Amino acid sequence: MKYLITGGAGFIGSSLAKKLVDNGHEVTVIDDLSMGKKENLDTEKVYFIKGDIRDNELMEQVFEKTQFDYVFLLAAIASVADSIQRPIETHEVNLDANLNILKLIKEKQNDIKRVVFASSAAVYGDEPTLPKKENSQIKPLSPYAIDKFASEQFVLLYNNLYGVPASVVRFFNVYGMNQNPESPYSGVLSIITDKFKQKLAGKDAVFNVYGDGNQERDFVFIEDVIQALMLVSESESSRGNVYNVGTGIATSLNRIIEIYNDYFKISMKLNYLPSRDGDIRYSYADISSLQNLGYVPIYSIVKGIHSYLKKELENL
Ligand code: NAD
Ligand code: UD2
């Protein structure tokens, strides 16, 4: 089968590309490398296009050249903080470019089997009801969340109105290899991993805990996310639907730090700071819709972190 992954040099996209190539599929990736890295991809096996999804001419060429079976829309300015700093640019990437891609798919991709759009748990905002169900109240609190929700709606509209087969996934807090820890707003597990690597290298590392560390998240390991993406893209009944992607279990940041300390048998120095503005206290997903498609999360938080760290240490 032929796959296109926008943002495929990033964390989730590159892991998906690897899985698809290993399963014998033909994979094209388009990424501007603003956050992703070419080294995340085996470019002998993946057809890599360095480009911006806002470049309409380029996107037109991509869809004229190849008839894809599956398209995963993962390219995004994926940081909430960035979206607050640069709302217009974020909007152009996170909404306008996706809308243009949907239009091109409608016009040029007659045999497409599925478009899957990567949305976020951020669409639920800080409304306190838990666990989050797909039909829970939507309360977007940032340009990032607004554009994710608006893109979701366009994706579903193209499915319902124009017959473009499409589904939406809302990722909770994904972690694993190749997650870029460079920004202070990168996924917290990539930051903690980076701090432990610094400490192992003999540096004086300190991990900043925003708040008391009792905030909880539904941390989901990349392998389970890939499982979810395969199920959603291949299932007939997922067409036109939205799926939470998590584990259904919440873990506190303090517990995460404990798991890392135990694994490395060292104690990370912690610096407790005030909570970040707008930080959500508790979040976890109701995953029953995804379970109805056959999803079984394999990785408990301990098993997932251990697999992640084992691979990180192999690559040191
Ligand atoms: P990531 O930043 O690693 O991947 C996004 C990729 O998009 C990057 O490689 C980046 O270079 C690329 N990109 C950005 N702007 C582009 C543009 N204009 N043209 C082409 N490529 C562009 O992030 P990720 O964690 O792999 O996230 C993948 C998707 O999942 C994103 O849409 C993100 O919003 C969503 N998501 C991720 C999480 C998570 O926990 N990682 C949670 C919720 C939603
Ligand atoms: C954001 C997004 C989510 C997803 C995720 C990426 C919202 C509502 N959600 O969630 O959609 O994109 O990021 O993983 O914006 N923390 C520290 N120290 C650090 C870094 C973080 O204490 O160095 C805390 C942070 O304040 C928060 C928790 O760790 O309480 C998780 O932070 P995160 O940035 O990984 O993810 P989160 O849930 O804010």
Image (cartoon, rainbow, N blue to C red):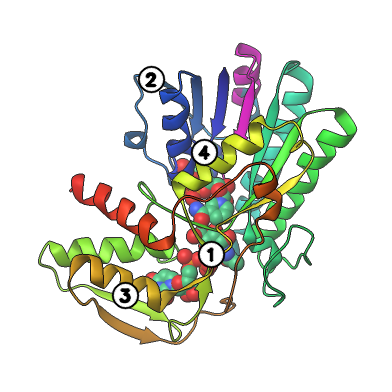
Residue pictured at 69% horizontal, 32% vertical: 235
Number of numbered markers: 4
As drawn, the residue found furthest toward the top would be 65
Cα distance in 3D space between marks 4 and 1? 23 Å
Tell me which label, 4 or 1, sits earlier in the chain. Answer: 4
| SS of the residue under disc 1 | loop
Q: Quadrant of the N terminus?
A: top right
Which one is closest to the eye, mark 4 or mark 3? Answer: 3
The alpha-carbon separation of the residues under discs 3 and 1 comes to: 17 Å
Looking at the picture, how far across and down is residue 113, in whole percent? 70, 23
Dot 1 surroundings within 10 Å: few (below 14), some, or many (20 or more)?
Answer: many
Q: Between disc 4 and disc 3, whose residue precedes?
A: 4
Residue depicted at x 39% and y 55%: 304
Foreground pick, 75 / 214: 214
CA gap between label 3 and label 2 equals 39 Å
Sequence-first disc among 2 and 4: 4
Find the distance from the CA under tag 1 to the CA under tag 2. Answer: 33 Å
Dot 2 falls on a residue whose secondary structure is loop
Which range is magenta? 58-78
Mark 2 or 4: the one toward you: 2
Query: Going 29% across and 68% down the picture, which residue do you hit?
Result: 260
| 46 vs 173: above or below | above
Q: Amino acid at mark 3?
A: Glu
Q: Label 2 sits on what residue type?
A: Lys
Label 3: which secondary element: helix
Residue identified by numbered label 1: 218
Q: Which mark is residue 258?
A: 3
Q: Say which label, 3 or 2, has the lower sequence index.
A: 2
Query: Where does the image place residue 303, in percent across and percent down from the top left?
Result: 36, 57
